[in-house]
Amino acid sequence: MYKTIIKRSTQLQKYSSNIGLFGSLNQPLSTRLFASFDRNTKDLKESVLIKRSASTYSDERTTHFGCKDVGEKQKKEAVLEVFHNVADSYDLMNDAMSLGIHRVWKDYFMKKLDPGPTTKLLDVAGGTGDISFRFLEHVGKAALSREDGANVTVFDINASMLKVGEARAQKLGHTQGISFVEGDAQELPFEDNTFDCYTIAFGIRNVVKIDLALKEAYRVLRPGGRFMCLEFSKVKPQELESLYDLYSFQVIPPMGKVLAGDWDSYQYLVESIRKFPDQETFAGMIREAGFSFVKHEDLTFGVAAIHSGFKL
């Protein structure tokens, strides 16, 4: 069950780029709904704190953190630390991981999604806003200002990433149709059948239990709703895979050290890609979560892939 606490209203325009972290990363997991957008007044009408049980993690069950075997709780905390460390250099990180091509991939991803003027989008692991801002630009200002028009909920487990996203939204002038929520993809704080689309870009591989996240995606989508995932994947053919491995392990971590002062986070990110299921295996997991018409498309020889499915 959900426990909801209504807080004092505030305006998005009054948020500064110096918004602090939304609580300590060492505190028990909670989710915070920071914005319920009022289209008539263009205000951030309410901040809603929603708490849910964090019972899905146990160090008695092991998983992987990169190439290491760790407990589930250990992985959750370790991933939080990684993205806390890279939040301010997130674009730089993606540039290093993809040689800058991630920007083209994300543009194509939004073109494939092709949201309409009334689409309600949940963008999971979307803290810095890369996908959400493309969504806002795609649907246009008219759709955002109309009654029951399009809107996006930016959802992320990491407060540091959300902080960067809110600051970027201010800088870019995105003050309509967008809200920011901190929470866990394995326990979404939303009612069943709430959203038209669910997107997750370069985030699903960092989830402790991917199967639970996929089931939650299915639950919160409306019938006819679409799931879309953009993620690093398995490179084809094998000759290119060997070259990509050489670049990934011999270039990216040292580059992270030089450009961001952080070797370990970049080493994990490289290793996490190798641990993620290949295209067909991941497509099977999406089907097992209940989705129909599941398809995938390789990008740049499989360096990344788009997976798509529908809730019928």
Image (tube, rainbow, N blue to C red):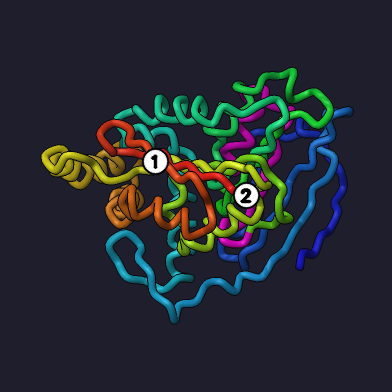
Residue 20 against residue 54 in the figure, above or below: above
Query: Which label was assigned to residue 21?
Result: 2
Q: Is residue 212 left or right of residue 4?
A: left
Query: Percent from the top left, x then y, of residue 141?
Result: 71, 19
Q: Residue at point 68% right, 44% down?
A: 195
Circle 1 Cα neighbour tier, 10 Å, few/some/many (<14 / 14–19 / ≥20): some
Q: How many numbered marks does the figure carry?
A: 2
Query: Which label was assigned to residue 202?
Result: none
Amino acid identity at mark 1: His
* Distance between the alpha carbons at the discs numbered 2 and 1: 36 Å
Q: Nearer the viewer, residue 12 or 19?
A: 12
Query: Percent from the top left, x then y, of residue 216?
Result: 59, 58
The segment highlighted magenta reads 162-187
Q: Residue at point 71% right, 51% down?
A: 193
Residue 83 against residue 226 in the figure, above or below: below
Q: Nearer the viewer, residue 312 or 96?
A: 312
Tell me the quarter of the picture where residue 95 sits: top left
Circle 2 Cα neighbour tier, 10 Å, few/some/many (<14 / 14–19 / ≥20): some
- Identify residue for label 1: 296
Q: Is residue 157 left or right of residue 278?
A: right
Mark 2 residue element: loop
Q: Is residue 228 magenta?
A: no
Amino acid identity at mark 2: Leu
Q: Are marks 2 and 1 in contact (CB under 8 Å)?
A: no
Tell which tag, 2 or 1, sits nearer the viewer: 1
User: Does residue 308 show up?
Assistant: yes
Query: Percent from the top left, x then y, of residue 265?
Result: 35, 51
